[in-house]
Amino acid sequence: MDKPRVRFAPSPTGYLHIGGARTALFNWLWARRNGGTFILRIEDTDQGRSTREAEAAIFEGLRWLGLDWDEGPEVGGPHGPYFQMERLDLYEAHAEKLIAEGKAYACTCTKEELDAGRKKAEAEKRQFRYPGTCREKRHDRSRPHVVRFRVPEHGATGFDDLVKGHISTPHETLQDEVILRSDRVPLYNFGAVVDDITMKVNLVGRGDDHVNNTARQVLMYQALGYPTPAFAHFPMILGADKARLSKRHGATSVTAYRDMGYLPQAVVNYLVRLGWSHGDQEIFSLEELVRLFDLKDVGQTAGVFNPEKMAWVNHEWLKKLPDEELARLALPHFRAAGLGAEDDAKLRHVCAVARDRVKTLAEYAQSFRYFYAPAELDPKAKAKFLVPDAKPILEAIRTGVAAMDALETQALEKLFHDEAERRGLGLGKVAQPVRVALTGGTASPGMYDVVQILGKAETLRRLDEGIRAAG
RNA sequence: GGCCCCUUAGUCUAGUGGUUAGGACGUCGGCCUCUCACGCCGAAAGCAUGGGUUCAAGUCCCGUAGGGGUCACCA
């Protein structure tokens, strides 16, 4: 097989969403795996809904995921331009060729007439198909008109999908569809076909909401006299209610996950596993995927997006990062939470203890704000642990910490253990009141880490407050 | 509704005629332990359904049910 030339062709009508990202990922992986070319093309023919902001958001999302394109906006390439609105002449020329050969024709039916026909068909409970009013007419092309593609009346057109197998569509279910609007802008099926031909795309990988478009497109390739590319339709991504994933299912843009403290490695890893697998393996790096990804391993059943598993995958990736990297990535989240963190030893220590405890970087700042802001005393924790009995314990720990030059782990360990032993208590009886005093709650990283992160002065200050509260 | 596609635990999946149906998330239990996590060990939970074909069916065929997609001068 020739080197694959694949493309991701989003319409810039919104951010890069989870489904689009996975489509892009599968295409990108297939190109990289086979030394092929990954093309980005912007299908901006829906002028009412396309925006520059959405274009930028899509570029940003792809780049964040690490999916670079070989041809397309901002990088150029030999088959540009890569925006459909800049390729109008191309569509028109191909449409003219079809008209000249009798494979397409001008249609002057108005939208009103067609809508009336549709309404009538609905009332009579039958399928509406374009009745062919302009099919055999000589058309006055000075009047407003669309161009329709002539579809054979009988028979069927099929293709072999790389993931779904053979799919056949009876022509009876098709109609002479519009390929060029009256303003000369192409419709999806035609624009995509002309572009894929002229950009020499030889494998079309897209969501399986496009399977029903494929036969029409195959017919167009044939009419235009070009070989059809291979097709691969990827199963849809669904929400928990099994409906197609959408905004009402929560965050669906990839950049929203970035902002929630997900790593691009994790998003890629989770998305690739939704519809693709490699034995029992769950964790894959992009490099590994380039080596292992194969379209033949893409499944054909729609998958439900599961945020909990994605969080788990994120945690797995977070656990792999060195403290320095973790701190660098977590810093913006602390800042966003209004905390005055710096990329320093303290933040690295905080990240080191956070690593095993929470699954996203945004949670680092949420769960450990008491390292940067006054502890908020949980009333229940206070009632249970900051009691008169705890006062002497807190005082003893305070005295011990006050006497230390450096807050060495071993010294702290000795301090707590000795205190427990002296009183004939378990270590927990000593640690819990201290924990509540220092963090405000009953769950936190280990006490020695907490003391070290807080530092001597702040530890003493909080112990003083705890002693007051206990008294 | 027509047409197209799909169907292994709550979820993602392995499985290509002979397996105690494997892994993962989540859930539950235990161990570890200064709390919470992490880690480790363990458990519950699945082939939608009815017929065939076959010595043998999660795997092949047909039907049924359920789910999804699509039927525009949107993409």
Image (cartoon, helix red, strand yellow):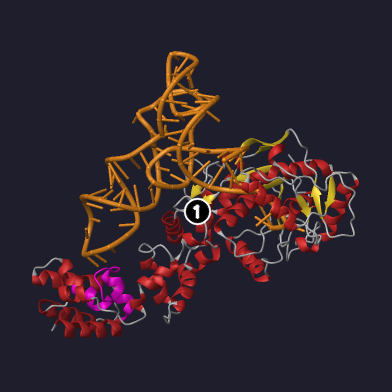
A79 sits to left or right of A126: right
Residue A445 inside the magenta-drawn segment? yes
Looking at the rendering, which quadrant does residue A63 occupy? bottom right
User: What's under tag 1, amino acid-wise?
Assistant: Tyr
Quadrant of the image containing the N terminus of chain A: top right
Tell me where residue A9 appears, x and y as whole percent.
68, 56
Q: Secondary structure at mark 1?
A: helix
Q: Position of residue B61 (x, y in %)?
A: 55, 24
Q: In the displayed structure, does residue A468 sit left or right of residue A303?
A: left
Residue at 10% of width from left, 72% of height from top? Answer: A422
* Residue stretch rendered in magenta on the structure: A433-455
| Residue A276 among those drawn in magenta | no
Give the camera-side residue of B16 and A230: A230
> Residue placed at 65% from the left, 69% from the top?
A56
Residue A129 shows in the view: yes
User: In the rendered view, would you say A101 is above or below A389?
Assistant: above
